[in-house]
Amino acid sequence: QTIESTIIDKDESPKRLKTNKYRVLVVDDSLICQKVLVKALNVIGINTDTASNGKEACEKLSAEPCIYDAVLMDLRMPIMDGITATRVCKGYKHLENVPIIIVTAEFGEEIREAAMNANATSFINKPANMQELRLLLFKLLSD
């Protein structure tokens, strides 16, 4: 099953968000993971931008006003990991209400707790269940 059919087949939420209304920053050191997430988000009408590590994400997110409506943040990356980047970004006043979703291949309560202690909004395991991610984003962005 393709990413597109996985995303569009279910009727639990609208098939697309209002095109061009939302922008999500996808932060991952894996180009393959970036491409999969970007394609999945673009299919449902979400604009995307990418960063390859936490430091690059913090630089993009430090600009005011914030142009991103949400962030998908990998956990393990070179230069600056996702937990550190989340903690730094949540320290910026203008990012307090921007959802940061940790996306990681690591499992366990210790990892989840570290993400939540960094003020991450949510946590999704890799490989990302696109339906779960889609529903989470609809919930977070439609409020």
Image (cartoon, helix red, strand yellow):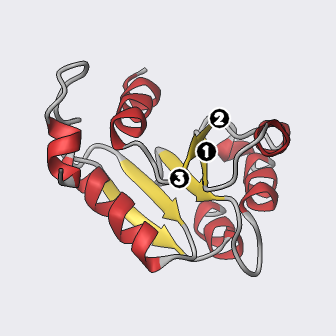
State the residue position of label 3: 126
The answer to whether residue 64 is visible is no
| Count of numbered marks | 3
Asked if marks 2 and 1 touch (Cβ < 8 Å), the reply is yes
Element type at mark 3: loop
Asked if marks 2 and 3 touch (Cβ < 8 Å), the reply is no
Task: Specify whether 46 is left or right of 68.
Answer: left
Sort mark 3 into few (<14), some (14-19) or many (20+) by Cα contacts within 10 Å.
Answer: some
The answer to whether residue 24 is visible is yes
State the residue position of label 1: 100
Asked if marks 1 and 3 touch (Cβ < 8 Å), the reply is no
Residue 61 image position (x, y, % from top left): 61, 61
The relative height of residue 75 versus residue 16 in the rendered view (above or below) is below
Residue 129 image position (x, y, % from top left): 41, 42
Q: CA distance from mark 2 to mark 1?
A: 5 Å
Residue 105, quarter of picture: bottom right
Three-letter amino acid code at the position of disc 3: Lys
Three-letter amino acid code at the position of disc 2: Thr
Three-letter amino acid code at the position of disc 1: Ile
Q: Residue at x 38, y 58 (%)?
A: 37
Residue 99 image position (x, y, % from top left): 58, 39
State the residue position of label 2: 121
Q: Earlier in the sequence, mark 1 or mark 3?
A: 1
Q: Earlier in the sequence, mark 2 or mark 1?
A: 1
Q: Residue at x 48, y 61 (%)?
A: 26
The relative height of residue 127 versus residue 101 in the rendered view (above or below) is below
Residue 141, quarter of picture: top left
Depth check, mark 1 against mark 3: the one in front is: 3
